[in-house]
Image (spheres, helix red, strand yellow):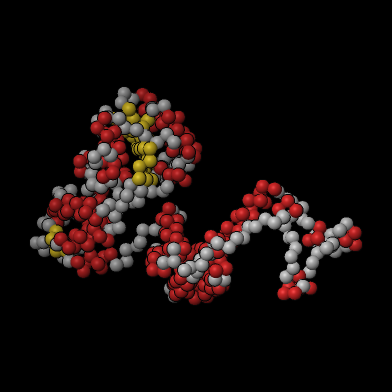
Amino acid sequence: MQNLFAEKKRPPLAERMRPAVLDEFVGQTHLLSGKGPIKEAVAKGELHSMIFWGPPGTGKTTLARLLSSLKGYRSTSFSAVLSGVSDVRRAIAEANLAKDRTVLFIDEIHRFNKAQQDAFLPYVEDGTIILIGVTTENPSFEVISPLLSRTTVYVFYPLLKEEIRIIIDRAITDERGLRGLNPDIAENVRDYIAEISGGDGRVALNILEFAVITAEKRDKRTIMLNRIKEIVKELPLIYDKKGEEHYNLISAFIKSLRGSDPDAAVYWLARMLEAGESPLFIVRRMVIFAAEDVGNADPQALTLAVSCKDAVHFVGRPEDYLPLSQTAIYLANAPKSNSALITYKKALEDVKKYGALPVPLHLRNAPTSLMRDLGYGKGYKYPHNFKGGRVKEEYLPEKLKGKKYYVEGPGNVKKQ
């Protein structure tokens, strides 16, 4: 049997299986089925500038290429990694001379700097080009506001298990795929690949391809479930320590702590640690949480969080998960009070509103006779000279006399 992988420069399975026409595209039904906006735009023959934003392996680049090749449009493309302003200007000049409208496809548009994005902004605005940009990064942060306002952002979601099964089945039976290797893959094995691929079609196809080409060469290349489990045992979790998922996971962790759910908190903790997040970043957030969300409802929480920082430093990997887990569980179960946050914000409002109000004379420092003659410190009541160490005295500026920032209630609610 001919080995389909003997050819030196044969593209990976995921590349070979890219849909050739829109009808082959799988997933993102909110955009392409029923009255989906992209389906309607294609049906009317009126494409508009758009940005596709979503995780890897969800079809962004594939759909962008398919739209760029539609009849009645001229297509040009380049990667933001390899192209500069001169390439943009050249593409614009060619678009001005072209008979058909030009679709400019930019892969990894988030890598374009401001100058590069500014270069084609006027031509998106006047319709010289139809821009289709693809990014895994949040365009709110990576695309300049003027350009963002002139495009429509479409969010791509991880593929459903059923959708990945379609992609897997097609790759097994299609001539472009693995059919020539005669793979024998049971339904439960296909389901397992779809399940563990994390909604990423490319990951599913990479696992499938590796399993088939490394299988024993017989009449049929039989792939067992155990073999797939061996391949994916060390599969890295999808996590970008500088990207949006970084903020999504820490957000889920903090909100689980705040919601007094230790199970969810430790789950998100494990997700972050296994994906390579810095333990010190996590414990830093827990120290902040202990003061912001637990506060004086349980002052010991802050002490434990700071101790966790020392323990993480001292113990190191891999056992540092133990003090992290212990602290996360404690914080989740602790009574909650956000009085430190609420009280400070109320005080800050008056600081900004009234500016530098003068310190009352009786509270001022009086280290010299001149200061004392001017009344500095005069009339100050030393609390320790009074019963119980307390005395009624005004400590706020005159303009804020009697103001209350700390109030028992919503800012100091204990867990029931």
Q: Can see residue 325?
A: yes
> Which x, y percent locates residue 325?
44, 72
Q: Residue at x 41, y 42 (%)?
A: 109
Residue closest to the eye, 186 or 234:
186
Q: Can see residue 292?
A: no
Residue closest to the eye, 166 or 170:
166
Left or right of 152? Residue 175 is left
Which quadrant holds the N terminus?
bottom left
Residue closest to the eye, 362 or 70:
362
> Which x, y percent locates residue 247?
45, 56
Residue closest to the eye, 228 or 323:
323
Tell me which corner region of the image, top left, top right, bottom left or bottom right, holds residue 53.
top left
> Which x, y percent locates residue 163?
22, 51
Left or right of 10? Residue 355 is right
Numbered label tally: 0
Q: Quick one: which residue is furthest to the left in this view?
A: 219
> Which x, y percent locates residue 132?
35, 38
Left or right of 300? Residue 79 is left
Q: Residue at x 32, y 66 (%)?
A: 234
Q: Residue at x 73, y 73 (%)?
A: 389
Q: Residue at x 76, y 70 (%)?
A: 383
